[in-house]
Image (cartoon, coloured by chain):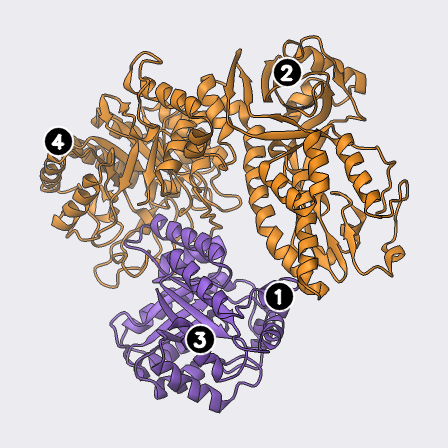
Chain colours: A orange, B purple
Amino acid sequence: MVERNPPDATFGWGVVFSEETLGALRDADYETYTQISNSFARWSAIDIHFRGKTVRSHGHVFTGISRKVLLSILQGRCRELGVELTFRREVSDLAVFADADLVVGADGVNGLVRRVHADAFRPALSIHPTKYIWYGANLALDAFTFIFRQNHDGLFQVHAYPFDAHTSTFIVECPESVWRRAKLDTASEADSIAYCEELFGEELNGRRLLSNRSAWINFVTLRSESWHHGNVVLLGDAAHTAHFSIGSGTKLAMEDSIALVDALRRHRDLTTALNDYELERQPVVERFQEAARESSTYFENVSRYAAFEPVQFAFNLLTRSRRISHVNLSVRDPELVRAVDGWFFSRASGRADGVARLSPPPMFAPFTLRGLTLANRTVLVAPNQDSATDGMPDDRLRDALGRCVETGAGLVLTEQTAVSAEGRVTSGSPGIYRAEHGPAWGRIVEDLHERGGRIALQLGHAGRRGSTRPRSKGIDQPLPIGAWQLVSASAIPYGHRSPAPRAVDGRGMATVIAQFGAAARAAHDADIDLLELNFGQGYLVASFLSPLSNRRDDAYGGALDNRMRFAIEVLDAVREAWPGPLAVRMTASDWVAGGFELDDAVTLAATLKAHGCDLVDAVMGQNLVESRPDYGRLFGVPASDRIRNEAGVPTIASGHITTFDEANTILAAGRADLCVLAL
Amino acid sequence: MRVGIGLPTSTPGASRDLLLEWSVRADRGPFSTLAVVDRIAYPNFEPFTALAAAAALTRRIDLATMAAIGPLRNTALLAKQAASIDALSVGRLTLGLAVGARGNDYDAAGIDHRGRGRRLGEQLDEIRTIWEGEQIGPKCARPSGPRLLVGGGSGEALLRMARSSDGYMHGGGPPRAFAGAAARARAAWTDAGRPGAPLLWGMGYYALGEGTSDAGAGYLRDYYAFAGPFADKIAAANLTTPGAVADFVRGYQEAGCDELVLFPTVSSMDQLDRLAEVLG
């Protein structure tokens, strides 16, 4: 074992372990396990200090140990086992290990071993935007502690955890802009400590912060495609890092080394052993890195939740990395989940806080919007039937809606219904543009109301995605017979085989706006419960919003304000004609570089809200065919979260939400107000 | 879940006699589909030619490309080849298409590697139009032609799959990897507004019997040599015991796979019998 530092040198203060790590260590080396467990601090609570309140969550098992103690236990055990330990020796060339059977690079995120064989390991480094610093504190905490503190410079947060009876690790983190405003970029070590001691004086209660060559840094996430090359293998931070907010660096390194030894015992052949090690560990580490990414993203954007009630703020924090959900947390801490559910239900049903102690989970709390009350927070989108003739809704469509209603969903959303014949997506799209369409919808809605359903009519104009065949064999397939002229913001076809649309002119826009208004009136007469305008997914209004499909040089093209103009005019016309709750579906990101992005979506949502939109249905992509979609788990939820909490408008989340637990977690954490379930 | 078997067109020593006998016996065995892989710069049999031979010798078993590399081929010719196999086999073809993973196949064919995803997307729509049209025959057994599946792990590939095909073809891995990909495929499908659900196909590699595991691993390391160190992992995951095959099959079934195809990694007739025995 060759180490460049002296035996007792370490950065940071304490290390946190989970039960699983300890179990693995117990099986791998009982001696070390015993010594480590005798030196542990154990605790089971998480405290969240926010807006003058402390929310305590129980049932989380943590164990912590001082880094120095851990080092000395490991070194002692090495000596006992006859490992030759060399300290204060810098290695600058791996050739010194030429006669080794195996070289293990455990030399950290900037380690030499990885850099020497970068071609084989293919590492990727990404630097996180926030600044943080490792302090210690003479503070005996009895919980993993998060502190959020706002001052004139901005929002700071602390991640603190005990590692012995007297001392805690105390990490301070803030956005770089806040760090500069606080002049911490130019502060000396002592100045930084003084600033943080003053900021967190209340929690420190007169105790001091301790520095250990502490400096403000950015966290670096390292991913390596491969961890071994010839007779060289990486473990721990040398191979991979995961953001400190899920506290896992030492844990992963120890698990790696246990797995490596096991693999070497299992296989005589070195390459086979190293492959096996990697096969076992890489998926585990990737899952951790994914959780760490979600956790760090949460802390980078936490100011978004500054107005949350502490109980919801706490639930949101605890479920930030998706490793803990509503169900997991109700096993660990049933009281807290009951409090969250009760708070949620009380608020949703307009009762005094705390009255609803026997409340259902958030999915089954009612939702009220402009006089409409939905029995629960679930939305089902009726599958596209494409069975209408000249827009006339038929029995098949009614039956499909009926099956959705029968599930008990709080709201059933129709397939996109056209405001004009040219606005249909397929030759079988339903519409609400001829005199007989409205009454036909009225009969369907009456039937669905009798069965207890609440119906949202999705209103749209297909634009350049119109004139296509029914979608059983694919989408955007041009109609071979009976095609109609398409319109769009600019004369750019949607798919490679789509006919070129005509750029809609002023008169055309006025016509479409009038058609939306007329359709809204007809929907009102048909007793529709909620109207949703589809301004996303590449249809007519979306073609104005995305800079990649809008090349206009008039007042409707160019800057975002101009590109939003048509959407606002349509919304205004509908708002005038439709007194009920009004939702807008928007594509929150084109999934194309240089396209409509989440920042734009927040601006758009805030503007729509100002013009009377009550609810935003945030979806992803489909504005352009050539895009880079990400269909990862719950892929639409981050957009819903951001729009809801930055634009301040209620949202519907989608993105393949398939379980009640996912829906309850999203709703309780305040990432959406309604969830589209994919059942 | 249906379970199919690969035709050993790319394993070392694959011969005319092996392929023909393999096809005949697969048709009699407990397998749903006989599938072929596709490479250019490799000593394997050309997939459509191999399937034509198999079509002639079989009556029951379905045939599939898993997957043919679309952009390497002229679209009209590709559609015509697939229609011909479909006609020769009376509607037993499933055409799986993907962009492939290796640049050298494109080099060998003299085709630009860039833009391959976009070209595959265009091909998918054009092939269906050709099948349904009158100009380029033969007529397929079904009006809209063979089942069309798309492979590839990226979001772009899943979008192409959802836009223009009947389902998803996974590229291999443990059941958990398949389950993750299947969830993304379903998500892409629903998100695109397609009614129903995508067909989900999975694949795996095996070598059963004394002394076959080294040869199997050697073939996989060679076949996936382009993938660098990842080839070792694929080789290490080769299913070499009846228990491993049974676990794998069960895992895929639980993950919602519609059709799992197991490919042999050594060129020997007994591999078919051994797999048949495991599947019962």
Per the rendering, the mark at residue B275 is: 3
Q: List x then y, in percent, for residue A177.
A: 65, 24
Circle 1: residue type: Ala
Q: Residue at x 77, y 39 (%)?
A: A74
Q: Is residue B114 above or below residue A679?
A: below
- A145 relative position to A663: left or right: right
Between label 1 and label 4, give the one nearer the viewer. 1
User: From the viewer's perspective, is residue B133 above or below residue A13?
Assistant: below
Label 3 with label 2: CB-CB less than 8 Å:
no
Residue A405 circle label: none
Chain for disc number 2:
A
SS category of the residue bearing label 2: loop
Q: Residues within 10 Å of mark 1 (few under 14, many from 20)?
A: many
Residue occupying the point 11% across, 36% down: A442
The disc label shown at residue A153, or none:
2
| Badge 4 and badge 2 both on one subunit | yes
Give the structural element (helix, strand or loop) at label 1: helix
Question: Which residue occupies 24% across, 55% down?
Answer: A484
Pair 4/2: label in front: 2
Extreme residue toward the bottom, this view = B17
Picture quadrant of residue A194: top right
Q: Are marks 1 and 2 in contact (CB under 8 Å)?
A: no
Rounded to the nearest whole Å, what is the CA distance between mark 3 and mark 2? 68 Å
The amino acid at mark 2 is Asp
Few, some or many C-alpha atoms within 10 Å of disc 2 (few <14, some 14-19, many ≥20)? few
Estimate the spatial distance between the alpha carbons at disc 4 and disc 2, rounded to whole Å: 54 Å
Q: Nearer the viewer, mark 3 or mark 1?
A: 3
Q: Nearer the viewer, residue A581 or A391?
A: A581
Q: Which mark is residue B231?
A: 1
